[in-house]
Amino acid sequence: MNWKNHGVLMDKKQRTIKKEVSYEGRGLHTGNKTKITFKPAAENFGFRFLRTDIKNAPEIPALVDYVVQDHELDSLRGTTLKKDEVEVHTVEHVLAALAGLEIDNVLIELEGNEPPIGDGSAMPFVNRLLEAGIEEQDAIKEYLVVEEPLGFSDEQRGIEYAALPTDDYRLTVMVDYKNPALGSQHSGLFSMEKEFISEFAPARTFCFLHEVEMLAEQGLIKGGDLDSAVVIVDRDLNDTDMQRLKKMFEIDETVELGTNGILNNKTLRFRNEPSRHKLLDLLGDLALAGVNIKAQILAARPGHQNNIEFARLLRTYYKKQTLTRKYQDVSKKGVVFDINAIKKILPHRYPFLLVDSIIELEPEKKAVGIKNVTTNEPFFQGHFPQKPVMPGVLIVEAMAQVGGILLLNEQADVGNKLVFFMGIDNVKFRKIVQPGDQLVMELIMLKNRRSTFKMAGKTYVKGELVCEAEMMAAVVDSES
Protein backbone atom coordinates (compact mmCIF):
# COMPACT_ATOMS: atom_id res chain seq x y z
CA MET A 1 0.00 0.00 0.00
CA ASN A 2 1.19 3.48 -0.83
CA TRP A 3 0.52 5.37 2.39
CA LYS A 4 0.92 8.72 0.70
CA ASN A 5 -1.94 7.96 -1.65
CA HIS A 6 -4.07 6.87 1.31
CA GLY A 7 -3.73 10.16 3.12
CA VAL A 8 -1.22 9.43 5.88
CA LEU A 9 1.44 11.66 4.41
CA MET A 10 -0.54 14.28 2.54
CA ASP A 11 0.71 17.34 0.72
CA LYS A 12 -1.08 19.61 3.18
CA LYS A 13 1.17 21.49 5.58
CA GLN A 14 0.62 21.95 9.30
CA ARG A 15 -0.89 25.29 10.32
CA THR A 16 -0.73 27.68 13.25
CA ILE A 17 -1.90 31.25 13.82
CA LYS A 18 0.10 34.35 12.87
CA LYS A 19 -0.23 36.26 16.13
CA GLU A 20 -1.51 36.09 19.68
CA VAL A 21 -5.21 36.84 20.16
CA SER A 22 -7.54 36.86 23.18
CA TYR A 23 -11.23 36.68 24.07
CA GLU A 24 -12.84 37.52 27.43
CA GLY A 25 -16.17 36.66 29.01
CA ARG A 26 -17.86 34.70 31.78
CA GLY A 27 -17.24 31.04 32.45
CA LEU A 28 -20.39 28.96 32.03
CA HIS A 29 -20.21 27.10 35.33
CA THR A 30 -18.22 29.39 37.64
CA GLY A 31 -19.72 32.64 36.40
CA ASN A 32 -16.29 34.19 36.92
CA LYS A 33 -14.67 36.52 34.42
CA THR A 34 -12.26 34.48 32.34
CA LYS A 35 -9.89 35.10 29.46
CA ILE A 36 -8.61 32.78 26.76
CA THR A 37 -5.50 33.58 24.72
CA PHE A 38 -4.46 31.68 21.60
CA LYS A 39 -0.73 31.75 20.82
CA PRO A 40 1.23 30.49 17.80
CA ALA A 41 3.04 27.20 18.40
CA ALA A 42 5.82 25.23 16.74
CA GLU A 43 5.35 22.33 14.35
CA ASN A 44 4.07 19.07 15.91
CA PHE A 45 3.10 20.96 19.10
CA GLY A 46 -0.58 20.11 18.83
CA PHE A 47 -3.08 21.79 21.17
CA ARG A 48 -2.14 22.39 24.80
CA PHE A 49 -3.93 24.28 27.56
CA LEU A 50 -2.11 26.35 30.19
CA ARG A 51 -3.73 27.84 33.31
CA THR A 52 -2.02 31.23 33.71
CA ASP A 53 -3.94 31.86 36.95
CA ILE A 54 -2.08 29.02 38.71
CA LYS A 55 1.61 29.25 39.55
CA ASN A 56 3.74 26.51 37.96
CA ALA A 57 0.67 25.03 36.28
CA PRO A 58 1.52 22.28 33.80
CA GLU A 59 0.64 22.37 30.13
CA ILE A 60 -2.26 19.99 29.58
CA PRO A 61 -2.17 18.30 26.16
CA ALA A 62 -5.54 18.19 24.43
CA LEU A 63 -5.61 14.38 24.30
CA VAL A 64 -8.10 11.77 25.50
CA ASP A 65 -5.40 10.52 27.89
CA TYR A 66 -6.09 13.58 30.06
CA VAL A 67 -9.89 13.52 29.99
CA VAL A 68 -11.62 13.00 33.33
CA GLN A 69 -15.24 11.93 33.69
CA ASP A 70 -16.03 11.48 37.34
CA HIS A 71 -19.78 11.94 37.66
CA GLU A 72 -23.17 11.94 36.01
CA LEU A 73 -22.95 15.62 35.11
CA ASP A 74 -20.05 15.16 32.71
CA SER A 75 -22.30 14.70 29.69
CA LEU A 76 -24.05 17.98 30.55
CA ARG A 77 -21.09 19.96 31.80
CA GLY A 78 -18.83 19.20 28.85
CA THR A 79 -15.36 17.76 28.44
CA THR A 80 -12.77 18.23 31.19
CA LEU A 81 -8.98 17.81 30.97
CA LYS A 82 -6.78 17.26 34.04
CA LYS A 83 -3.08 16.99 34.79
CA ASP A 84 -1.34 17.13 38.19
CA GLU A 85 -4.58 18.16 39.91
CA VAL A 86 -5.03 21.10 37.50
CA GLU A 87 -8.25 21.05 35.47
CA VAL A 88 -9.68 22.80 32.44
CA HIS A 89 -13.41 22.44 31.84
CA THR A 90 -15.70 22.72 28.81
CA VAL A 91 -12.97 22.59 26.16
CA GLU A 92 -15.06 21.17 23.30
CA HIS A 93 -16.08 24.45 21.62
CA VAL A 94 -12.51 25.73 21.61
CA LEU A 95 -11.24 22.48 20.09
CA ALA A 96 -14.07 22.44 17.54
CA ALA A 97 -13.04 25.93 16.39
CA LEU A 98 -9.42 24.83 15.95
CA ALA A 99 -10.32 21.55 14.22
CA GLY A 100 -12.91 23.22 12.00
CA LEU A 101 -10.36 25.80 10.82
CA GLU A 102 -7.88 22.95 10.23
CA ILE A 103 -5.30 24.46 12.58
CA ASP A 104 -2.72 22.05 14.02
CA ASN A 105 -0.54 23.83 16.57
CA VAL A 106 -1.67 26.36 19.19
CA LEU A 107 -0.94 27.10 22.85
CA ILE A 108 -4.20 27.95 24.64
CA GLU A 109 -3.76 30.02 27.79
CA LEU A 110 -6.63 30.37 30.26
CA GLU A 111 -7.13 32.75 33.16
CA GLY A 112 -9.57 30.49 34.98
CA ASN A 113 -10.66 26.88 34.80
CA GLU A 114 -12.87 27.19 31.69
CA PRO A 115 -13.12 29.27 28.52
CA PRO A 116 -15.70 32.04 28.18
CA ILE A 117 -19.09 30.64 27.20
CA GLY A 118 -19.86 33.48 24.75
CA ASP A 119 -23.10 32.75 22.95
CA GLY A 120 -22.81 28.98 23.50
CA SER A 121 -21.31 28.29 20.07
CA ALA A 122 -17.79 28.06 18.66
CA MET A 123 -18.18 31.28 16.68
CA PRO A 124 -16.52 33.67 19.18
CA PHE A 125 -13.36 31.54 19.06
CA VAL A 126 -13.53 31.19 15.28
CA ASN A 127 -13.76 34.96 14.89
CA ARG A 128 -10.70 35.55 17.08
CA LEU A 129 -8.67 32.87 15.30
CA LEU A 130 -9.55 34.34 11.91
CA GLU A 131 -8.57 37.75 13.26
CA ALA A 132 -5.17 36.31 14.25
CA GLY A 133 -4.68 34.89 10.76
CA ILE A 134 -3.61 31.37 9.81
CA GLU A 135 -0.24 30.47 8.33
CA GLU A 136 1.30 27.29 6.97
CA GLN A 137 4.33 25.67 8.54
CA ASP A 138 6.97 23.51 6.92
CA ALA A 139 5.98 20.16 8.47
CA ILE A 140 3.45 17.91 6.73
CA LYS A 141 0.17 17.11 8.47
CA GLU A 142 -0.15 13.65 10.00
CA TYR A 143 -3.39 11.71 9.50
CA LEU A 144 -5.31 8.86 11.02
CA VAL A 145 -6.61 6.97 7.99
CA VAL A 146 -9.52 4.66 8.72
CA GLU A 147 -9.06 1.63 6.45
CA GLU A 148 -11.80 -0.67 7.76
CA PRO A 149 -15.09 0.02 9.54
CA LEU A 150 -14.71 0.86 13.22
CA GLY A 151 -17.64 0.93 15.60
CA PHE A 152 -18.69 1.71 19.14
CA SER A 153 -22.14 1.41 20.71
CA ASP A 154 -24.07 1.68 23.95
CA GLU A 155 -27.07 -0.55 23.26
CA GLN A 156 -28.96 0.34 26.44
CA ARG A 157 -28.98 4.02 25.52
CA GLY A 158 -29.34 3.50 21.77
CA ILE A 159 -26.03 5.26 21.07
CA GLU A 160 -23.97 4.19 18.04
CA TYR A 161 -20.80 5.43 16.35
CA ALA A 162 -19.07 4.27 13.20
CA ALA A 163 -15.98 5.36 11.29
CA LEU A 164 -15.89 4.35 7.62
CA PRO A 165 -13.09 4.67 5.06
CA THR A 166 -13.10 7.79 2.89
CA ASP A 167 -10.52 10.21 1.52
CA ASP A 168 -11.77 13.20 3.56
CA TYR A 169 -13.13 14.09 7.01
CA ARG A 170 -16.92 14.02 7.12
CA LEU A 171 -19.33 13.87 10.04
CA THR A 172 -23.01 12.96 10.19
CA VAL A 173 -25.07 13.18 13.37
CA MET A 174 -28.59 12.00 14.17
CA VAL A 175 -30.48 12.92 17.34
CA ASP A 176 -33.88 11.71 18.44
CA TYR A 177 -35.52 13.34 21.47
CA LYS A 178 -39.00 12.64 22.76
CA ASN A 179 -39.86 16.32 22.71
CA PRO A 180 -42.08 18.08 20.13
CA ALA A 181 -39.76 21.09 19.99
CA LEU A 182 -36.94 18.89 18.70
CA GLY A 183 -38.19 15.55 17.42
CA SER A 184 -35.73 13.70 15.20
CA GLN A 185 -32.97 15.68 13.55
CA HIS A 186 -29.87 14.96 11.55
CA SER A 187 -27.04 17.01 10.11
CA GLY A 188 -23.94 16.37 8.04
CA LEU A 189 -20.68 18.22 7.46
CA PHE A 190 -19.04 17.17 4.21
CA SER A 191 -16.55 19.95 3.50
CA MET A 192 -14.69 21.50 6.43
CA GLU A 193 -13.39 24.33 4.27
CA LYS A 194 -16.75 25.29 2.73
CA GLU A 195 -19.25 24.53 5.49
CA PHE A 196 -17.74 24.76 8.96
CA ILE A 197 -17.60 28.54 9.51
CA SER A 198 -21.03 29.41 8.12
CA GLU A 199 -23.05 26.26 8.83
CA PHE A 200 -21.75 24.78 12.10
CA ALA A 201 -19.57 27.18 14.09
CA PRO A 202 -22.61 29.42 14.94
CA ALA A 203 -24.73 26.50 16.28
CA ARG A 204 -25.41 27.14 19.97
CA THR A 205 -25.51 24.70 22.84
CA PHE A 206 -28.95 23.57 23.90
CA CYS A 207 -30.35 21.83 26.93
CA PHE A 208 -33.66 20.82 28.41
CA LEU A 209 -35.13 22.85 31.22
CA HIS A 210 -34.87 19.96 33.71
CA GLU A 211 -31.13 19.76 32.95
CA VAL A 212 -30.72 23.49 33.59
CA GLU A 213 -32.49 23.17 36.92
CA MET A 214 -30.40 20.16 37.93
CA LEU A 215 -27.13 21.93 37.06
CA ALA A 216 -28.23 25.02 38.97
CA GLU A 217 -28.96 22.89 42.03
CA GLN A 218 -25.40 21.54 41.80
CA GLY A 219 -24.01 25.08 41.96
CA LEU A 220 -23.08 25.09 38.26
CA ILE A 221 -24.04 27.27 35.23
CA LYS A 222 -23.50 30.42 37.31
CA GLY A 223 -22.42 32.16 34.11
CA GLY A 224 -25.29 30.88 32.01
CA ASP A 225 -28.08 33.07 30.69
CA LEU A 226 -30.68 32.98 27.94
CA ASP A 227 -28.13 34.37 25.48
CA SER A 228 -25.67 31.50 25.95
CA ALA A 229 -27.95 28.52 25.35
CA VAL A 230 -31.18 27.41 23.74
CA VAL A 231 -33.37 26.11 26.58
CA ILE A 232 -35.97 23.53 25.54
CA VAL A 233 -39.04 23.51 27.80
CA ASP A 234 -39.90 19.92 28.63
CA ARG A 235 -42.59 20.44 31.29
CA ASP A 236 -45.45 22.77 32.13
CA LEU A 237 -44.49 26.06 33.81
CA ASN A 238 -46.49 28.25 36.18
CA ASP A 239 -45.89 31.79 37.42
CA THR A 240 -43.79 30.55 40.34
CA ASP A 241 -41.56 28.66 37.93
CA MET A 242 -41.16 31.79 35.80
CA GLN A 243 -40.07 33.89 38.78
CA ARG A 244 -37.60 31.22 39.85
CA LEU A 245 -36.10 31.14 36.36
CA LYS A 246 -35.72 34.93 36.34
CA LYS A 247 -33.81 34.72 39.60
CA MET A 248 -31.74 31.78 38.38
CA PHE A 249 -30.61 33.61 35.23
CA GLU A 250 -30.42 37.02 36.96
CA ILE A 251 -32.56 38.73 34.32
CA ASP A 252 -35.02 41.58 34.59
CA GLU A 253 -37.11 41.04 31.50
CA THR A 254 -40.06 38.70 31.31
CA VAL A 255 -39.43 34.97 31.03
CA GLU A 256 -41.95 33.30 28.72
CA LEU A 257 -42.80 29.71 27.94
CA GLY A 258 -42.58 30.24 24.20
CA THR A 259 -44.98 28.96 21.58
CA ASN A 260 -42.17 27.10 19.79
CA GLY A 261 -41.25 25.08 22.88
CA ILE A 262 -38.13 27.18 23.49
CA LEU A 263 -37.83 29.41 26.52
CA ASN A 264 -38.59 33.05 25.63
CA ASN A 265 -39.40 32.07 22.03
CA LYS A 266 -35.71 32.23 21.15
CA THR A 267 -35.28 32.00 17.38
CA LEU A 268 -33.10 29.17 16.13
CA ARG A 269 -30.22 30.07 13.84
CA PHE A 270 -30.85 26.89 11.85
CA ARG A 271 -33.93 24.71 11.66
CA ASN A 272 -31.83 21.82 12.97
CA GLU A 273 -29.53 23.86 15.20
CA PRO A 274 -29.49 21.26 18.03
CA SER A 275 -28.20 18.50 15.75
CA ARG A 276 -25.64 20.90 14.27
CA HIS A 277 -24.42 21.72 17.76
CA LYS A 278 -24.16 18.01 18.57
CA LEU A 279 -21.97 17.68 15.49
CA LEU A 280 -19.90 20.65 16.70
CA ASP A 281 -19.39 18.98 20.09
CA LEU A 282 -18.43 15.74 18.35
CA LEU A 283 -15.87 17.55 16.19
CA GLY A 284 -14.31 19.12 19.29
CA ASP A 285 -14.25 15.90 21.30
CA LEU A 286 -12.76 13.87 18.43
CA ALA A 287 -9.95 16.44 18.18
CA LEU A 288 -8.74 14.80 21.41
CA ALA A 289 -7.60 11.84 19.31
CA GLY A 290 -4.62 14.13 18.73
CA VAL A 291 -4.38 13.77 14.96
CA ASN A 292 -6.15 14.82 11.77
CA ILE A 293 -8.74 12.28 10.69
CA LYS A 294 -9.59 10.81 7.30
CA ALA A 295 -12.92 9.04 7.79
CA GLN A 296 -16.68 9.28 7.48
CA ILE A 297 -17.92 9.53 11.08
CA LEU A 298 -21.54 8.53 11.76
CA ALA A 299 -23.01 9.15 15.20
CA ALA A 300 -26.50 8.37 16.49
CA ARG A 301 -27.53 10.18 19.70
CA PRO A 302 -23.98 11.24 20.62
CA GLY A 303 -22.95 12.83 23.93
CA HIS A 304 -19.68 13.90 25.48
CA GLN A 305 -19.06 10.71 27.45
CA ASN A 306 -19.45 8.45 24.43
CA ASN A 307 -17.69 10.93 22.14
CA ILE A 308 -14.65 10.52 24.37
CA GLU A 309 -14.86 6.72 24.30
CA PHE A 310 -14.96 6.83 20.50
CA ALA A 311 -12.02 9.27 20.49
CA ARG A 312 -10.09 6.76 22.64
CA LEU A 313 -10.86 4.03 20.10
CA LEU A 314 -9.62 6.24 17.24
CA ARG A 315 -6.44 7.20 19.13
CA THR A 316 -5.65 3.54 19.84
CA TYR A 317 -6.22 2.74 16.17
CA TYR A 318 -3.91 5.60 15.19
CA LYS A 319 -1.14 4.44 17.57
CA LYS A 320 -1.34 0.93 16.13
CA GLN A 321 -1.30 2.34 12.59
CA THR A 322 1.74 4.49 13.41
CA LEU A 323 3.65 1.54 14.87
CA THR A 324 2.85 -0.62 11.87
CA ARG A 325 4.20 2.04 9.52
CA LYS A 326 7.30 2.39 11.69
CA TYR A 327 8.35 -1.25 11.79
CA GLN A 328 6.32 -3.31 9.35
CA ASP A 329 5.80 -3.81 5.62
CA VAL A 330 2.20 -2.62 5.60
CA SER A 331 1.31 -4.79 2.61
CA LYS A 332 1.34 -7.89 4.84
CA LYS A 333 -2.23 -8.49 5.92
CA GLY A 334 -3.10 -10.14 9.25
CA VAL A 335 0.29 -9.33 10.76
CA VAL A 336 1.14 -6.30 12.86
CA PHE A 337 4.88 -7.08 13.12
CA ASP A 338 6.67 -9.76 11.09
CA ILE A 339 10.05 -11.20 12.07
CA ASN A 340 11.94 -8.34 10.41
CA ALA A 341 9.95 -5.76 12.37
CA ILE A 342 10.44 -7.75 15.58
CA LYS A 343 14.21 -7.64 15.06
CA LYS A 344 14.02 -3.85 14.96
CA ILE A 345 12.35 -3.85 18.38
CA LEU A 346 13.94 -6.75 20.29
CA PRO A 347 17.71 -7.24 20.69
CA HIS A 348 17.35 -11.07 20.81
CA ARG A 349 18.82 -13.23 18.02
CA TYR A 350 19.23 -16.92 17.18
CA PRO A 351 18.91 -19.18 19.07
CA PHE A 352 17.08 -17.08 21.63
CA LEU A 353 14.57 -15.12 19.53
CA LEU A 354 11.34 -16.96 20.33
CA VAL A 355 8.67 -14.84 18.61
CA ASP A 356 7.90 -15.17 14.89
CA SER A 357 5.18 -12.52 14.51
CA ILE A 358 2.83 -10.18 16.35
CA ILE A 359 -0.73 -10.57 15.09
CA GLU A 360 -2.57 -8.21 17.45
CA LEU A 361 -1.49 -5.07 19.27
CA GLU A 362 -3.33 -2.53 21.39
CA PRO A 363 -0.68 -0.02 22.44
CA GLU A 364 -0.11 0.03 26.21
CA LYS A 365 -2.78 -2.65 26.68
CA LYS A 366 -2.31 -5.95 24.86
CA ALA A 367 -0.12 -7.91 22.45
CA VAL A 368 -0.62 -11.33 20.85
CA GLY A 369 2.39 -13.14 19.39
CA ILE A 370 3.04 -16.36 17.49
CA LYS A 371 5.87 -18.90 17.91
CA ASN A 372 5.97 -21.81 15.47
CA VAL A 373 7.69 -24.72 17.20
CA THR A 374 9.63 -26.83 14.69
CA THR A 375 11.62 -30.02 15.07
CA ASN A 376 14.76 -28.01 14.23
CA GLU A 377 14.69 -26.05 17.52
CA PRO A 378 18.17 -26.42 19.06
CA PHE A 379 16.82 -27.19 22.54
CA PHE A 380 15.17 -30.41 21.30
CA GLN A 381 18.64 -31.99 20.94
CA GLY A 382 18.87 -32.35 24.69
CA HIS A 383 15.22 -31.94 25.88
CA PHE A 384 14.60 -34.79 25.16
CA PRO A 385 16.12 -36.66 22.20
CA GLN A 386 13.59 -39.51 22.36
CA LYS A 387 10.55 -37.38 23.25
CA PRO A 388 11.05 -33.72 22.28
CA VAL A 389 9.37 -31.33 24.73
CA MET A 390 9.80 -27.55 24.73
CA PRO A 391 11.24 -26.48 28.11
CA GLY A 392 8.69 -24.64 30.20
CA VAL A 393 11.21 -21.92 30.97
CA LEU A 394 11.47 -21.15 27.25
CA ILE A 395 7.67 -20.91 26.92
CA VAL A 396 7.80 -18.31 29.67
CA GLU A 397 10.70 -16.60 27.88
CA ALA A 398 8.69 -16.51 24.64
CA MET A 399 5.80 -14.85 26.50
CA ALA A 400 8.27 -12.43 28.07
CA GLN A 401 9.52 -11.44 24.61
CA VAL A 402 5.96 -10.68 23.48
CA GLY A 403 5.68 -8.58 26.62
CA GLY A 404 8.94 -6.88 25.70
CA ILE A 405 7.48 -5.88 22.33
CA LEU A 406 4.41 -4.47 24.11
CA LEU A 407 6.72 -2.34 26.28
CA LEU A 408 9.34 -1.32 23.72
CA ASN A 409 7.33 -0.58 20.58
CA GLU A 410 6.53 3.01 21.58
CA GLN A 411 9.99 3.88 22.91
CA ALA A 412 11.50 6.77 20.96
CA ASP A 413 15.01 5.26 21.06
CA VAL A 414 14.13 1.58 20.97
CA GLY A 415 17.62 0.55 19.84
CA ASN A 416 19.08 1.71 23.16
CA LYS A 417 16.44 0.18 25.42
CA LEU A 418 16.21 -3.22 27.10
CA VAL A 419 13.47 -4.97 29.07
CA PHE A 420 14.69 -6.62 32.28
CA PHE A 421 12.24 -8.91 34.06
CA MET A 422 12.15 -8.31 37.80
CA GLY A 423 9.87 -11.12 38.85
CA ILE A 424 7.65 -13.92 37.56
CA ASP A 425 4.72 -15.12 39.67
CA ASN A 426 1.93 -17.68 39.54
CA VAL A 427 3.54 -19.74 36.78
CA LYS A 428 1.51 -22.77 35.77
CA PHE A 429 2.20 -25.33 33.02
CA ARG A 430 -0.95 -27.09 31.80
CA LYS A 431 0.21 -29.18 28.82
CA ILE A 432 3.45 -30.11 27.07
CA VAL A 433 4.54 -28.37 23.85
CA GLN A 434 6.02 -30.50 21.05
CA PRO A 435 7.36 -30.03 17.50
CA GLY A 436 4.61 -28.92 15.13
CA ASP A 437 2.74 -26.90 17.76
CA GLN A 438 2.03 -23.21 17.30
CA LEU A 439 2.17 -21.07 20.43
CA VAL A 440 -0.33 -18.20 20.58
CA MET A 441 0.84 -15.92 23.37
CA GLU A 442 -1.40 -13.21 24.81
CA LEU A 443 0.07 -10.54 27.08
CA ILE A 444 -2.20 -8.10 28.95
CA MET A 445 -0.92 -4.99 30.72
CA LEU A 446 -2.01 -5.00 34.37
CA LYS A 447 -0.08 -2.02 35.77
CA ASN A 448 1.92 0.73 34.12
CA ARG A 449 4.04 2.86 36.46
CA ARG A 450 6.41 4.92 34.34
CA SER A 451 9.40 2.55 33.92
CA THR A 452 8.04 -0.54 35.72
CA PHE A 453 5.25 -2.75 34.47
CA LYS A 454 3.17 -5.78 35.40
CA MET A 455 1.68 -8.07 32.76
CA ALA A 456 -0.38 -11.26 32.66
CA GLY A 457 0.57 -13.81 30.03
CA LYS A 458 -1.23 -16.86 28.67
CA THR A 459 -0.05 -19.28 25.98
CA TYR A 460 -2.38 -21.46 23.92
CA VAL A 461 -1.95 -24.34 21.49
CA LYS A 462 -4.99 -25.06 19.32
CA GLY A 463 -7.12 -23.02 21.71
CA GLU A 464 -6.02 -24.92 24.83
CA LEU A 465 -4.15 -23.18 27.63
CA VAL A 466 -0.63 -24.61 28.03
CA CYS A 467 1.05 -22.00 30.24
CA GLU A 468 0.25 -18.85 32.24
CA ALA A 469 2.25 -16.42 34.36
CA GLU A 470 2.39 -12.89 35.76
CA MET A 471 5.51 -10.85 35.03
CA MET A 472 7.11 -7.72 36.48
CA ALA A 473 9.49 -5.84 34.17
CA ALA A 474 11.44 -2.61 33.81
CA VAL A 475 12.55 -0.72 30.72
CA VAL A 476 16.18 0.45 31.09
CA ASP A 477 18.86 2.05 28.93
CA SER A 478 21.03 -0.61 27.34
CA GLU A 479 24.18 1.21 28.46
CA SER A 480 23.16 1.37 32.13
Image (spheres, helix red, strand yellow):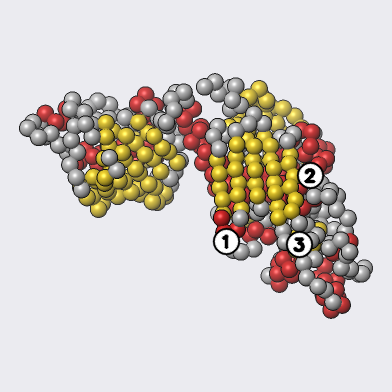
Image vertical order of residue 28 relative to residue 92, above or below: below
Residue 261 at x, y = what percent?
83, 63
Q: Nearer the viewer, mark 1 or mark 3?
A: 3
Q: Residue furthest bottom?
A: 240
Q: Nearer the viewer, mark 2 or mark 1?
A: 2
Residue 169 at x, y = what percent?
67, 35
Q: Amino acid at mark 2?
A: Ala
Query: Residue 327 appears in which quarter of the rendering?
Result: top left
N-term-proximal mark, 3 vs 2: 3
Q: Amino acid at mark 1?
A: Asp
Local SS, label 2:
loop
Residue 24 visible, this orientation: no
Distance in Å between CA atoms under marks 1 and 3? 28 Å
- The numbered disc on residue 201 is 2
- The numbered disc on residue 179 is 3
Distance in Å between CA atoms under marks 2 and 1? 28 Å
Local SS, label 3:
loop
Residue 137 or residue 300, whichever sits in front: 300
Query: Residue 73 appears in which quarter of the rendering?
Result: bottom right
Q: Is residue 197 left or right of residue 267?
A: left
Distance in Å between CA atoms under marks 3 and 2? 25 Å
N-term-proximal mark, 2 vs 1: 1
Query: Residue 365 appears in which quarter of the rendering?
Result: top left
Q: Nearer the viewer, mark 3 or mark 2?
A: 3
The residue indicated by pointer 1 is 70
- Residue name at image x 63 percent, y 31 percent: 166
Residue 424 or residue 3, whichever sits in front: 3
Whether the residues at callouts 1 and 3 have beta carbons within 8 Å, the answer is: no
